Each structure stands twice: as C-alpha cells, then as structure tokens.
Image (tube, rainbow, N blue to C red):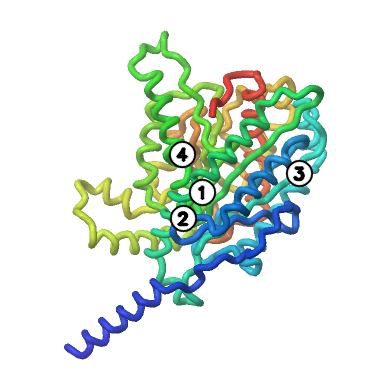
Amino acid sequence: MNSRIGMGLVAISIMLILVSCNYGHKQYRKSADITPSLTAPLVIEVDDFGRFWDRQATEATLQTIEKASLNKNTVVHVFIHGWHHNASESDRNFQDFQKTLVHLQDKLDDPEYARARELLNLKEGVHVIGLYVGWRGRSLPGWLNYLTFWGRKSAAERVGDGDLREFFVKLQNIYMDRNTSRSTGKPTFMGLVTIGHSFGGQVLFKAVSDAFENDLITAVAKVKGEPDQTRPKPEIVSGLGDMMVLLNPSMEAFQYERIDRLATEVSFNEDQAPVLLTVSAEDDSARKYWFPIARTLNVLFRPLFKNDEEKDLWTTALGEYEPQQTHTLQVSDRVPTISDSLYKKCAIAKEDLTQALVLGSAQLEPKPDRHRPYSPVVIAYTSNKLVQEHSGIFGETFSNFLIDYVTFVQGKRMCLIRGMGSAPTN
C-alpha cells in the first residue's frame, strides 16, 4: 500500500512539473506584419504574465487600424482563442478565423448591406480588418494538455487583467473618434466586434468587465429611488465597440452574477442596444460536465459556501447557469423580422434588439421570465444545429446570424452616435 501511495505521489509530482514547464511559452510572430489583409489578419501576442511579447508591434497595430479607418468604412473583427490554441499560423483557430474574415467581407459586400449603407448616407464599400489575440492556450503537447485546465484558467485571468485592458481602451477611443467625427460629405463608420471563445471568453470578460460594470452601476444610481413619473433615462451602457461576444465561455457564472443583478435593477429605454452577447451550445459537454467537475475539485482548497446558490454559481459555467439565461437561439425557416428598411431615417435607432428576432436562418427568442426590454446583455442558449459542441463556433448558419445581428446593432448605435438619439459617451 505504501509503495502504491509513493508511486502515486511521484506520478502527481511529475505531472505538476510538466504542467508548470515552459512548453509553448514563446512569441510565434517574430516580425509582425502590420499590413491588414483578408489572408493575413493582424496578430498581437500576450505572454503568460499578461504582458505583450512585443509592445512596439502592438502599438503599430493600433496605428494601422487608426490609419486604415480614417477615410473609409472599416469593420474590425477581434478574436481571442481559448484552450489548446496559440498564435501559430498552423493553429486551427487561426486558420478558421482567416476563413471567417473572407466570409464576413463577402457578406458585407452583398447588395443588401450596400443598400443599408446608402440609406444611412455613408460612403460605399467597407473594409474588414481581422485581429487575432494569441496567448498560451496550449501549454503541453498532445493529450497532456488536458491536464492543464487549472493552469490555463488562471493564465486566462492574468491575460485579461494585463496589457489587454490598456489595448482595448485605446481601441475603443479610436472607435469613438471615428464614429463621432463630423466630416463633410458622406461620412464613414468604424465597426468593432470582439469575440472570445472558451478561455478566450474569460480573457475578454476580465479585460472589459470592470468598465462594463461601472457603466451599469452609474445607470442604476441615476434612476434608483426616483418615482416612475419623474425617473430620468439611465445612462447608456457602452461596452467595447459595437458588441462583445462570449462563445461557450469557460468561466464561472459567479463572475457574471453582479452584472446580471445590476442589469435587472433598472429598466433601460429605447436608446440602449445590446453590447454583451453570450452564446452557449446545448451539447457543450466540456462546460456542461467537465467544467463543474474541475471547479468542484477546486472547491476543496476554498472556504465553504454560505449557501447552495453560491456553490452553483461557482461550479457552473456562464451560459449553463439557467437563472442567468435570457434567450434561446434556434434554427428557423421563418421570414426575417427586421430588414434594411429600418435604416431609412434611422428607424432602427428605437428598435428593441432583445425582442424575438429572426435573422438569416436563426431565431432569437426571449425567455418570458428573464427577458428585459432594451437590455444591454443577451445570454442565449443555442441548438447544436447552430453551434456544435464546445469548439463548433465557425459554422455558416451561426456566422450569418451573428453578422446580421451585429450589423443591426451597429446600425442602431451609429444612428444614436450621429445624433438621432442619446449617444454613448465612452
């Protein structure tokens, strides 16, 4: 018995040494190409301590985006990968992201989108810039990487707490400057959508949650305690760019609980657009089963919870925790419920984009007991026909829905920013 225990301890020690080794902790893009194109998205890399590997290249990336968006319509599409991935050109996520950029450019070149830009009196044409955020998602070779859940979860939190926060503030400043400029003739716009998948969702949430939460606190404070007839409009909750998207995020529902509570303490008005979209697949076994097991093991090293609700929030992934879900997302053959005609005279500025919507071949349906009109957050649970398992996030039907949905959000925010309603202030 003692020998077995000894062998077990040795095995555990070896595993811990392997998990804490330096495997994969390197910069994959030694000389950054800062010329954006469909075949070569921009890449920035963050080390395991949350610092940029090459700060000069990162600043050059911001300058490239700023310059490229100066005189033409530009959509910046940011993707933060998750577990098992990195910034290598051979990484599957990177390759799929490249294909997504081509698909996005093709969609935005469609006549229907050109017509929408015409109705908004914008310049013709739009250029897509991809930005891939690489970090050490893979820290061991092959199947051994499955032993690194706890290490990579902590690394994702460090990455989100690090230099990316500053980067996203600067990117947001460019976005606001481009969309509030009053140029003569037909103006241009800049779109910005940031997507985090799996532990990449944890990275994104950590990087932006403080600012997002502060916006909500301000909104609640402005209207709380006032009688209904004299209650002022809440402040606009801005978020990052047009929308932040968390796809199958590998983070605890506990981290989102305060935002969820704040978002339900105030009724937002027609000026508010959704700025945080979370999509969770119904057959995501990694987060439905393995995530709770991993978090339960972690509980052994923490104080006891004060009640079952607190335990459930800690051991359940965001999106899987049913009390926080606001919508379902399903495949649909119904006729789309909103069209580019809403851009005429900026009618979309007053549209509630959290209501029941059919876009492309997908339907977003509010849950009656959880839906809040004009809410800045949408927590959607989706069919496996749209998002397959944990990593099936690049399917065409889901991509089409996401592009359509973000485009309508962009249109609403653009109309508000340009004076057809209350404008976001940060």
Q: Is residue 342 above or below residue 5?
A: above
Q: Quadrant of the N terminus?
A: bottom left
- Residue located beneath label 1 in the image: 164
**Which circle's residue, 3 or 1, is located before the other in the chain?**
3
Mark 1 belongs to which amino acid? Leu
Q: CA distance from mark 1 to mark 4?
A: 29 Å
Q: Of the residues tagged 2 and 3, which is closer to the observer?
A: 2
- Residue located beneath label 4 in the image: 326
**Which circle's residue, 3 or 4, is located before the other in the chain?**
3
Residue at image point 25% right, 81% down: 9
- Residue located beneath label 2 in the image: 50
Residue 177 in view here? yes
User: Contact, CB < 8 Å: mark 1 with mark 2?
Assistant: yes
Tell me where residue 256 sits by quadrant. Answer: top left
Q: Is residue 14 above or below residue 93?
A: below
64 to the left or right of 326: right
Q: Which mark is residue 399?
A: none
Mark 4 belongs to which amino acid? Thr
Q: What secondary structure is marked by label 1?
A: helix
**Picture coordinates of residue 376, whole percent (x, y):** 50, 33
Judge the density around disc 1: few (<14), some (14-19), many (≥20) Cα neighbours within 10 Å. Answer: many
Q: Of the residues tagged 1 and 4, which is closer to the observer?
A: 1
Q: CA distance from mark 1 to mark 2?
A: 8 Å
User: Contact, CB < 8 Å: mark 1 with mark 4?
Assistant: no
**Picture coordinates of residue 172, whole percent (x, y):** 58, 37
**Which circle's residue, 2 or 3, is located before the other in the chain?**
2
Q: Is residue 392 above or below residue 144?
A: above
**Picture coordinates of residue 278, whole percent (x, y):** 50, 45
Mark 3 belongs to which amino acid? His
Q: CA distance from mark 4 to mark 2?
A: 32 Å
